Amino acid sequence: NAGVTQTPKFQVLKTGQSMTLQCAQDMNHEYMSWYRQDPGMGLRLIHYSVGAGITDQGEVPNGYNVSRSTTEDFPLRLLSAAPSQTSVYFCASSGRNYGYTFGSGTRLTVV
Amino acid sequence: KQEVTQIPAALSVPEGENLVLNCSFTDSAIYNLQWFRQDPGKGLTSLLLIQSSQREQTSGRLNASLDKSSGRSTLYIAASQPGDSATYLCALPDSSYKLIFGSGTRLLVRP
């Protein structure tokens, strides 16, 4: 049981580049979320999903897109990377009445 | 709107002490409550999950209690060790099952 798998673990982008952070879970969880955590700060919700085909914005959605075509996968797309998006990104999933499980994170640097 | 508060923000104790971390929430209509730990530069590890119908959960030296009527949860750590040093986060899902975090308690256990 792999839990929540995030790839890549580290990434360096140039300003203006686009990329997709991958997140996959094998627990058949309906709820999935993306957070970012800046140094010394708490987690902020970017986007979340309550099931395949259903997504919604969190508190900091600008500059990011998501889609949920399957229960297992919830990729996060950076449309045009900016230095302000330098952060650690965490994906998480949960089933109703289950606790949330977090991935190990993707450390992104935008130069 | 659910709001989660954690007290104290930081705590420094000598090794061997028993300690209590506090979490309070404003809306008592909760699904469950989860305690996480986060080590510097690392992801979130789930410690304990308390369902709405439960009063406490235990795992090793950790015990978490839940009092919905007063909007409080406590995390009790027995016989603290330097390896317990980390940030401890309390979190609850809201009505959309998005996880709402407290600001955390930064714990340092001195040898």
Image: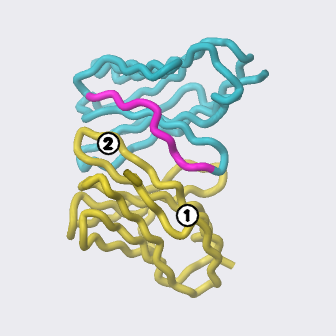
Q: Is residue A91 above or below residue A68?
A: above
User: Given the image, what chain letter belongs to the residue carrying mark 1?
Assistant: A
Whether residue A72 appears in magenta in the rendering, the answer is no
Q: CA distance from mark 2 to mark 1?
A: 23 Å
User: Given the image, what chain letter belongs to the residue carrying mark 2?
Assistant: B
Q: Which residues are magenta?
A: B42-51
| Secondary structure beneath label 2 | strand
Reading the image, the residue beneath label 2 is B93
* Residue type beneath disc 1: Thr
Residue at image location 37% in from the left, 45% down from the top: A100
Reading the image, the residue beneath label 1 is A106
Q: Is residue A40 above or below residue A67?
A: above
The crowd level at tag 2 (other Cα within 10 Å; few <14, some 14-19, many 20+) is many
Tell me which chain appears cyan. Answer: B
Closest to the observer, B51 or A56? B51
The answer to whether A42 appears left or right of A23 in the picture is right
Closest to the observer, A32 or A46? A32
| Secondary structure beneath label 1 | strand
Residue A82: where, in percent of width, then height? 59, 78
Residue at image location 67% in from the left, 22% down from the top: B81
Q: Colour of chain A?
A: yellow
Q: Quadrant of the C terminus of chain B?
A: top right
Whether residue B48 appears in magenta in the rendering, the answer is yes
